[in-house]
Image: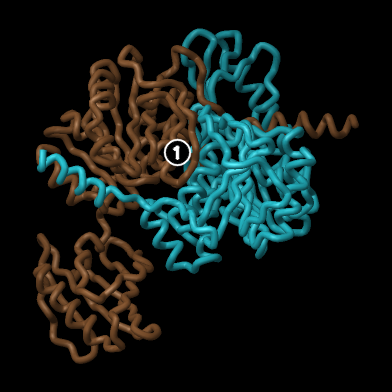
Chain colours: A cyan, B brown
Amino acid sequence: MKKRIMMWLMCLCCMKVNAHSKDPDAFHVGILLFDGAQAIDFVGPVEVFGQAGFRLTTVSKDGAEITTAMGLKVTPDQRLEPAMKFDAVLIPGGSINGRLIEDPVIQNWIMAQSQSAHYVMSVCNGAFILANTGLLDGLYATTIEKAFDSFARQYPAVKLARDKKFTDNGKVLTTAGLSSGIDGALSLVAKVNGMRSARTVAAKIEYDWVPSGGYIRGKMADRVLPEFDTLPTGVTLMAKTFHYGDEQNWFQGHVFDVGVKQPSRLSSWLDQQMKNAGWQAVSSDNTLAWSKQLGEQQWLLHVSVSHLQGTQFSTQLTLNRQI
Amino acid sequence: MKKRIMMWLMCLCCMKVNAHSKDPDAFHVGILLFDGAQAIDFVGPVEVFGQAGFRLTTVSKDGAEITTAMGLKVTPDQRLEPAMKFDAVLIPGGSINGRLIEDPVIQNWIMAQSQSAHYVMSVCNGAFILANTGLLDGLYATTIEKAFDSFARQYPAVKLARDKKFTDNGKVLTTAGLSSGIDGALSLVAKVNGMRSARTVAAKIEYDWVPSGGYIRGKMADRVLPEFDTLPTGVTLMAKTFHYGDEQNWFQGHVFDVGVKQPSRLSSWLDQQMKNAGWQAVSSDNTLAWSKQLGEQQWLLHVSVSHLQGTQFSTQLTLNRQI
């Protein structure tokens, strides 16, 4: 029995993990929650801020339980109150829609907080919620890579930074998509408590933090790839199986059901898609290849088509930057 | 008005973020929750598994709302039921104690699940909960770096891997601390759905995944540093300000209040601490330096002491591996 109690005490000592501060004088972050919020967008920063000794309060429009995009049910600490005063406000992204982005209660709350808070930071497509207040106008912002074009269309007054994991306009900050919130939160800790504190937090959470940016999805080659979002009648996109690589080269796979057993149907449609997107066919005997000049870069895209089964074919796109 | 509706529709299209599967046939992961669970330990994997199209169910002993170590209030989907069958079970860490580790309801549930599930994975010090079932006996395991020694003492039958972000024993898997759960979950997706799928998920969450390991806290030089956990009477550790570096070199700072205005008190105590830990003093005129052979490596530690204010002094430890 004595041995068991000793083991318990040992555990209690060694297991102590730093928790967030309850000190009313600690740097206080308000975290906006809403139905469909992406869990990693706010939990990454919550972990970082908590380890930095910040005080944390989660808030939502009505204070009721929310369900995250991944199904986690989280109960906020409070409902939105204009009288609340935070040192920083965090706005995550997720399954957002126009109703949420334009909600006057949320918009007014963010604007009121921005008057008194030192920092307002969005994560992922939370940038849309923040941009709609006008607080990002004339400033640099980033968001999840796949929302770049739509963000640029909707908020032409915002300077979209497609190659940054984190934008720092002094008071108003944004981060790239999903796990980038961890990097953004570490950068904010560095602003508040200094780089040593931020590095300590990164080491504590065993995170490989590259303060100057690290892996940036928006810098990857695939952002020059055509989207293939308008399919011909009878063709179905079954799966977008993989895409990875680095800034210079990128691989992407699709599975199409073309309705017939002939790959030529897919090939001729691909050829039309590429022409529509401004790519020039490169003569080649065995493979489909196109090239395109984008900015100062020349890109080369090879596509191979394989028969999977029945009327299903897979494509593998290989994109290379010509140096 | 038309323009506004169009903007909404645009948002709805572009904002769609992949959510977890509700398909009853999808690969199904049961996520154990408990009061004091570390949010990042389970939310990192939840995001990864959800993006991979897995089905997710959170469970706790009684199904009641839990409060994470960082204060988030999460309501599990269900209480523990032995009859539940999952394809994989995830055991996070956090502010765990002996009562939790030895809880027969939780222990029996894990053992019952391990009979039917393909995989059982712990994150961070969740390894203690898993090890206590005996399921890790004879297998390789890792945990949060600061719990290595206590884990080795408590579970001598487990092969502790101090230099791995993820251990894969086939069915029973473990990950290193906190954010390492993201890496571990990606490795599990690779086992279930293949490497291409795992890389796709990593790209989707904009995470810089290094499948072969990446940043491993337990490989860092500071694990050879003495802990300074027994202080002389009158000396107080005010802060452990920073520690970062790579495998070969490491910096660590402390602030001590030594009760008197003489740094010699700190220096002589440090000297005694280092001797007790088996380090040999290296002759030097201006700095405190010690060396030690650990395994095949020779380490050199320099300590500089600076006066901060009053009776407070700071120390900076610089540790280098001699090549």
Of B180 and A164, which appears nearest the observer? B180
For badge 1, the amino acid type reads Thr
Res. B46 visible in picture: yes
Q: Label 1 crowding class (10 Å Cα cut-off): few <14, some 14-19, many 20+?
A: many
The C terminus of chain B sits in image quarter: bottom left
Q: Is residue B200 visible?
A: no
* Residue located at (54% from left, 40% from top): A319
Asked which secondary structure carries label 1, the reply is: strand
What is the x, y in percent for residue B200? 48, 34
Q: Is residue A58 left or right of residue B40?
A: right
Q: Position of residue B253 (x, y in %)?
A: 33, 71
* Residue A302 position by quadrant: top right
- Chain assignment, label 1: B
User: In the displayed structure, does residue A4 sit left or right of residue A23?
Assistant: left
Classify the position of the N terminus of chain B by image quarter: top right
The residue sitting at 21% across, 39% down in the picture is B141
Choose between B127 and B6: the one closer to the eye: B127
